[in-house]
Each structure stands twice: as structure tokens, then as C-alpha cells.
Amino acid sequence: MTSRPGLFRVLVAIVVIVAALFVPLPWQPLTRIHSEVTIDRPPAVVFDYVSTPANWPLWHPSSLGVTGATDHSLRPGERVTEAFRVAGREGTVVWTVANRQAPRAWAIEGEIDGRAAGTVVYTLTPDGQGTRFEREFTYRAPTLLFSLLNWVALRQRVDSESAEAVRRLKARLEGGT
């Protein structure tokens, strides 16, 4: 049988370990999800389509809906709110356009509940008569628990959803379903 001081030490150790899982990390590891596809459409057409938020739910499986300035290709400083389901987690994110270099590059920065939630960067390069479209989603792990979950399962699911998104984008812009 364990003595009371021994049991107390074990309980304190468990509490400390659990608390450490939720403490903000000072270094916040960065995850990069890179997806790319070649689309048989000119860069300007692809750029206008992907930078118009009303189109996101039509090609990105994580986008459940978008509100705000959704009917045009967004310019720096413009914001939209997106309902999402990423790796099984649902929520809303406010995206702000951080960079626009039509038709070559476009970037948005996300915020969830006032905290940085990641950055999405689109890079478009002419490729013959078409466009090489690259999508990079970066996000940080704010806690040890998030970092562990990301390492075990989240990153793989986000990567898979991103690959599916660019596949759907290609199909949609080339006239498929």
C-alpha cells in the first residue's frame, strides 16, 4: 500500500504534467502544409477564382461557408469570416488579406477568438498555357498538448484535406465536378 506522502507526490506530479500540457509554449513550433497542382487555365483566371471567398466552399472541403466581402477578389486589409471543419474540428476564423500581387501571389492571415490561427499563401506560376498553383498553410502549436496532437494526427489530416482541396480546385476550374 502506498503511503500518504507518496500518493501526494504522485498526485502533484500528475497535476504538474497535465498543467504543462496547457501552458503556452515559448517557441511555438511551426507546421507547413504545402499542396500544389497544375491547372489548365491562365494564372489570372485561377487567381481571381481562389482569391474570391464565395468560391472557397465550392472547392475546399474544410470551408463550410464564408460571410462578409465574398463576391470579389479581395485586396489587402479586406476581411471575411469563414466557418470551417479542419481535421474534425469546427469553428470560425476571420481572414485578413495580408498580400496581393495579382496574378502571382495572395496571402491571408487568420484569427480565431483574437489569436493567430495560421496563414494561407497562394503562389501562381505560368506553366505553358496553364498555371502551377501552390497553396501553403502554416500554423503554430501554441501548447504542448496541441503540439503532441499535431504530431500524432492533426498534421496528417490537414495535409490530406489540403491535397483534396487542390485536386477539387483543378477539377472545378477545368470543367470537372
Image: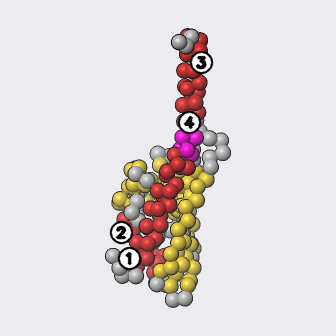
Q: Nearer the viewer, residue 76 or 13?
A: 13
Taking the magenta stretch, the answer to whether it contains residue 147 is: yes
Mark 3 touches mark 2? (CB < 8 Å): no
Q: Residue furthest bottom?
A: 129
Residue at the spot of label 2: 58
Quadrant of image for the C terminus: bottom left
Furthest residue in direction left, as rendered: 177
| Amino acid type of the residue that numbered disc 4 sits on in the rendered structure | Leu
Residue at 55% x, 25% y is 15
Look at the image and tell me whether residue 162 can be seen: yes
Task: Indicate whether residue 73 is drawn in magenta.
Answer: no
**Distance from label 1 to label 4 (Cα)?**
42 Å
Q: CA distance from mark 1 to mark 2?
A: 8 Å
Q: Is residue 122 left or right of residue 86?
A: right
Give whichever of discs 3 and 2 has the lower sequence position.
Answer: 3
Q: Give the residue number, with chain letter if any, for mark 4.
A: 21
The residue drawn where x is 50% and y is 61% is: 159
Q: CA distance from mark 1 to mark 3?
A: 60 Å
Q: Which dot, 1 or 3, sits closer to the camera?
A: 3
* Residue type beneath disc 1: Arg
Residue 89, placed above or below residue 105 = above
Query: Which contiguous range is marked in magenta?
Result: 143-148
Helix, strand or loop under label 3: helix
The alpha-carbon separation of the residues under discs 3 and 2 comes to 55 Å
Q: Earlier in the sequence, mark 3 or mark 4?
A: 3
Label 1: element kind: helix
- On the image, numbered disc 1 is attached to which residue? 172
The disc labelled 3 sits on which kind of residue? Answer: Arg
How many labels, in total? 4
Contact (Cβ within 8 Å) of mark 1 with mark 2: yes
Badge 1 or badge 3: first in the primary sequence: 3
